[in-house]
Amino acid sequence: MIKFYNVSKYYNKNAIALKQINMHIKPGEFVSIVGQSGTGKTTMVKTIIGEEKIDQGKIVIGGWDITNIGQREIPTLRRQIGVIFQDFKLLNKKTLFENVAFAMQVCGGNSKKIKKTVPHVMKIVGLENKANRYPQEISGGEQQRTAIARSLVHLPKILLADEPTGNLDSLNAYEIIDLLLHINKFGTTVILVTHNREIVNRLKKRVITLDNGTIISDQAVGRYIL
Amino acid sequence: MAQLLVIKLLEDIFYNFMTLPFIRIIKFSFQDIFRNIWLSLVTIIILILSLFTINTLLVVKLIGNAAIKTIKDKIDVNLFLKTSASEDEIMALKAKISSFPNVKEVIYISKEDAFKNFKNKHKDNSEITEALNELGKNPLSPSLVIKPVNLESFDSLINNLYGIENEIIESQNFTNYKLLLNKINNITEKVSKAGLILSCIFIFITILVVYNSVRVAIYTHRREITIMKLVGASNLFVQMPYLLSGIFYALISVLAIMLILYPFINLLQPYLETFFIGYNINLIDYYYNNIFKIFGIQFIFASIINIFASLLAVKKYSKV
């Protein structure tokens, strides 16, 4: 599903974000990418969604070589990859329903499809009864669930979660991880970027460990080794 | 650079035309305008000022042209003759002058006709009527009214008339209409130039203001733009509302200038009618008959400027 061939990314001569990365993530896998702050985890996410260009190597996603992806093709790529972040990125003036619908509206989805899809994804994340609330009226965990619902509206093949539990207490964090596992069961490839040791150890899934922009470990059933 | 931006925009529209939800883009555009309502108002006011300058320029041009036309129509030379001149002598002189190539027409006004015209013209002025009655005789001279073929032949006609040596001619002092026309031409030209400079300044200010309005609108919506891009909205969808805002600003400004100009022209019209008495100079009619042409061009022009300024801002600031 995601293939990195000798990928390197430099911000400048002294700041090497990724160095000779070789990685292959299969369809339907649940992979945790771990490492301390500044090791290149977020850069890796950015290269997958076309936000950052790489300086060397090749990236192939679902058979599509996105190494030199053009500006016009980036939206097509991003509709196939759901992304969630630590800060949720919700719009406070919109209800949860509107926040989720927004992702479809801005991509040209018609109203009929929006009315059908949004309640469905809200149900998957367990927020069907809070659809008319505003982000500030719900907990952090619920806000992250909303963000997950929004990332699911395009039925992505890949779900990228960049530190999704960073702003949550442990109870909410585990709920989010359970939800990601649930989504993974439907066949969506999930990539979890985190530095939360307990979560990674509890998952018992594949773990790729980054250090200074290099992969130092790739274990099929891994643990947080740093 | 501007050409490249426009070509790229047109390419984007062409490639995304079928998938673009235009109604949603219009809705987003209105949201941009209303969320920054004060900034939008300032932008519209600046646009109105620019359009007002341009319309003032147009009115000045119209009045200038009307003044020139009026004077051109009035150009003639009055050759005053001695009261003792006989009809035969006058007719001989008339024939001589008519034979000049630069003469279009020569009209003979006898002293009786001149007296009748004079009395008619001043029939409401009792002082003049009383003075004439007291005088008891016709004090006016006969004259020849000579019209030149065109304005260019005016100088040569004057020279020809000065060259005539005939003792029945009383005076050879001719009003120099050409000088007057040149003066009007000069004034109109100077006002047009000043107006043009003022318009350029306003256009420049408009570009700056629209650019900044769009920049602030983008800043206000930066979170939305980030999300739009993350969830896969096309660049055109992100940028189009701001470009449309530019067109809406132009539309609102043109409609406003129509409302502002109407009373302004109505106020000016009676003065023009008094000044150009006997001539059909009607600004209201002119604007009414050319409403689509005048304001259509202004709308297209304002839209192009606004789209250009918005495009510059959007390309620079909407990269998330």
Image (spheres, coloured by chain):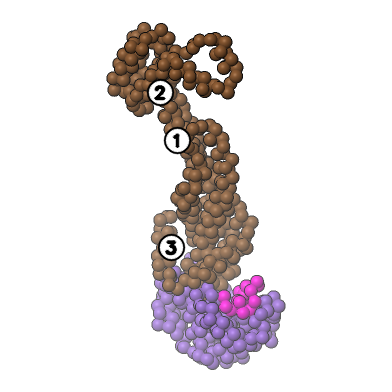
Classed neighbour count for the residue bearing mark 3: other residues with Cα under 10 Å, few (<14), some (14–19), many (≥20): some
Report the number of discs: 3
Point out the tag, 3 or 2, that comes first from the N-terminus: 3
Task: Determine the colour of chain A.
Answer: purple
| Residue type marked 1 | Asn
Which residue is tagged 1? B65
Q: Earlier in the sequence, mark 3 or mark 1?
A: 3
Vertical placement of residue B256 versus A217, above or below: above
Q: Which chain is brown?
A: B
- Which circle marks residue B9 in the picture? 3
**Amino acid beneath label 2:** Asp
List x then y, in percent, for residue B215. 56, 58
Q: What element carries label 2?
A: loop
The residue at the point 56 percent across, 46 percent down is B261
Q: Name the residue under label 2.
A: B76
Q: Give the range drawn in magenta.
A: A88-102
Q: Which chain carries label 1?
A: B
What is the CA distance from the residue labelled 3 to the residue labelled 2? 60 Å
Residue drawn at x 46%, y 27% is B183
SS under mark 3: helix
Circles 3 and 2 on the same chain: yes
Q: Is residue A25 left or right of residue A121?
A: left
In the drawing, what numbered circle is on residue B144?
Answer: none
